[in-house]
Amino acid sequence: MAPVLPVVLPLQPRIRLAQGLWLLSWLLALVGGLTLFCSGHLLVQLRHLGTFLAPSCPFATLPQVALAASAVALGTGLVGSGASRASLDAAQYPPWRGVLGPLLVSGTAGGGGLLVLALGLALVLPGTLDTGLEEGLGTALAHYKDTEVPGRCQAKRLLDELQIKHQCCGRHGYKDWFGIQWVSSRYLDPNDQDVVDRIQSNVEGLYLIDGVPFSCCNPHSPRPCLQSQLSDPHAHPLYDPRQPNLNLWAQGCHGVLLGYLQGLASTLGNLLAVTFLLQALVLLGLRYLQTALEGLGGVMDGEGEAQGYLFPGGLKDMLKTVWLQGGVAHRPAPEEAPLEEAPPKEGPSEV
């Protein structure tokens, strides 16, 4: 059977291949470590922002798969650097001969499969963030007032911290707060006529005001923050609600978080692509180095030329060998089956 993609490797090309693999393997380990760090960073950010993502959003799968893929790539780089360095020394290479083959198979199947899966998720899953943030932020705003409801006690604090840290207000803008009741009924005076009028002014029976929480205020504004009566042009001196409001954050949290998370996903996707390319080169080079050294008995400076290849035979021949080894070879062919001896004919019975 003719080997697949054979390459003749004399002594000097074998040495240069081993040296280049050592450098590529350390580069793969470095990029794999960076990818591991970025995956962990994205996973931590999603843990902090999980309150503002819909439970059905599958985006959190991306950093988990990327974390596993980058860990395998880091291990492949470290193994490749050790194997390529050991191949230059006849005394250090023999322990690698028995394990390098299985490591190549596991690195190609496991590491390559995880990287391909992570790359696919990096291309597909960022599109689910729009709907996930829309639903999650809407739920967070609706539960802002529920400071004494079990399971919702931290909703107000988390949303205030989000708006201060990311410099945003509401879901798509500060006017989103006008359409929900964000003040707990515990702090409303039922005897106040203004409170009663506001509750009776809508069919849901909610206390709606044209104001925003303090976390929407922009501390960089020279003017004291205006939080209430924001739709009344006469409520504040020198204030026009139709003009850009410098007192409040202009952007909604949906757009800010969407850009932030998609930026992290884009960076992670680029690192995964570089990791995939480097891992493919390292595994390919290790395979050629391994097969070339096997032809020389595991000695780098062996006499003569060596031939490196990907597979010892073609795909058709490999499948045929596997099929034959599976039991077909043990069944005798019709022409090879031993002929059964004919039973002896009985002679005429004696009278």
Image (spheres, grey):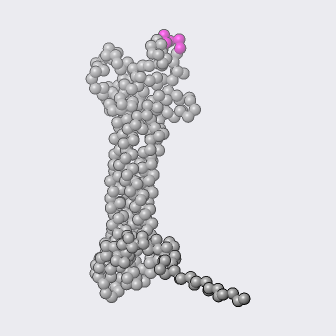
Answer whether residue 226 is visible to the viewer in this image. yes
Whether residue 9 appears in magenta in the rendering, the answer is no
Quadrant holding the C terminus: bottom right
Where's residue 55, x and y in %? 48, 39
Q: Which residue corresponds to the image point at 52% horizontal and 28% vertical from the top-left?
A: 146
Question: Which segment is the magenta one?
Answer: 190-196
Q: Is residue 278 left or right of residue 335?
A: left
| Displayed quadrant of residue 198 | top left
Answer whether residue 287 is visible to the viewer in this image. no
Q: Is residue 159 above or below residue 71?
A: above
Q: Which residue corresponds to the image point at 42% horizontal and 27% vertical from the top-left?
A: 213
Q: Nearer the viewer, residue 179 or 135?
A: 135
| Displayed quadrant of residue 22 | bottom left
Q: Nearer the viewer, residue 313 or 17?
A: 313
Q: Is residue 167 above or below residue 10?
A: above
Where's residue 89, x and y in %? 39, 81
Q: Which residue corresponds to the image point at 46% horizontal and 38% vertical from the top-left?
A: 54
Q: Is residue 35 above or below residue 232?
A: below
Where's residue 39, x and y in %? 41, 52
Whether residue 191 appears in magenta in the rendering, the answer is yes
Quadrant holding the N terminus: bottom left
| Displayed quadrant of residue 153 | top right
Q: Which residue corresponds to the image point at 36% horizontal and 64% vertical from the top-left?
A: 279
Q: Nearer the viewer, residue 132 or 89?
A: 132
